[in-house]
Amino acid sequence: MELEPGIHQLAHGRKPFGIPAPNVYLIQGTDASMFIDSGWDNEDDHAARMAYLKEVGGPSLTGLLITHRHADHGGGALHIHQDTGVPISAHRLDQAAIEAERFGGAATLNSVLDGGESYDLGGLTLQVVHAPGHTAGSLAVVIPERNVMLSADTVLGVTTTVVRPSEGDLGKYVESLRMLRDLKPRLIYPGHGEPLTDPDDRIRQLIEHRMHREEQIVAELKTAPKTIDQLFDTIYPNLPEERQRIGKEQVESNLIKLTNEGRVAIDGEVYTLT
Ligand SMILES: [Zn+2]
């Protein structure tokens, strides 16, 4: 559906962890069109995206930007590339994961981004912003003519963002939230779910949520040194089985942030306040 002139949102396929299906954005200027993300790698989803593209018409497709390495955002990219020939771009720090996991080692990115690039589509410009944290190479895209931001998974309305130690960095994530908030977008088009009409308030909530979790962990460590499992048991007491691994990873991400800041020290598996 067209959210505002030239900005289309497509959402097809599976809902990861019960949140809405990944959003694919089709941005159309007067001279060129680009996809931001590709959705899942799935025949039906792919056919639906191609049918949508044909139906809306408009200027020719000139590129596909993958916001980050995850399957729900870049899974279908290679299929779109094979059908349309458009170049695929993504951030340098997610390049290896995308080429190995999303392309199965069978293809490489056509262009590697660092943030700061822009694409002139004619009347609409896509400005690439590196917003690390959810993954090392996570990107946001700003469209200055409309003062809107495509935030991918870095800012979501439907849930808080998962930050896994193997892929991301909580300290950088919080810095990215502050940086995106300072850009003062009028509206955020997130990687899942409906547009966010009060970006400033939503980002403030997300920062406060992280600070609250951190304070909980520091308070727990004040009582005694603890392991990740012990902290997890008090901080996420009622988490369903299938979410427990991710919960433990969130605790670990907090501990890595605190360790990097010199506030916590680790001895074996035990974390202590310094
Ligand atoms: Zn993601």
Image: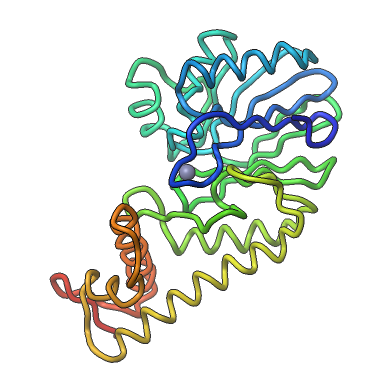
Image x and y of residue 64, in percent: 60, 24
User: Which residue shows up at 85% across the image and 40% down it?
Assistant: 145
Q: Is 126 on the left-hand or right-hand side of 38?
A: right
* Quarter of the image where one finds residue 227: bottom left
Q: Residue at x 77, y 24 (%)?
A: 28
Q: Judge from the rendering whether residue 109 lies leftward or rightward of residue 145; answer left or right.
A: left
Identify which residue, 47 or 77, lies in the foreground: 47
Residue at position x 52%, y 58% in the image: 160
Q: Is residue 252 above or below residue 195?
A: below
Q: Is residue 173 above or below residue 91?
A: below
Among all residues in the image, which is located at the extreme left?
A: 268
Q: How many marks?
A: 0
Left or right: 94 with respect to 154? left
Residue 192's image quarter? top right
Instruction: Tell me where residue 263 appears, x and y as whole percent.
Output: 35, 80
On the image, the x and y values in percent for residue 22 come to: 55, 37
Image point (51%, 44%), residue name: 138
| Quarter placement of the N terminus | top right
Instruction: Name the spot of residue 163 as percent of width and height, x first.
Output: 42, 55
Task: State whether residue 207 is above or below residue 77.
Answer: below
Say which quadrant the C terminus sits in.
Answer: bottom left
Model colouring: rainbow
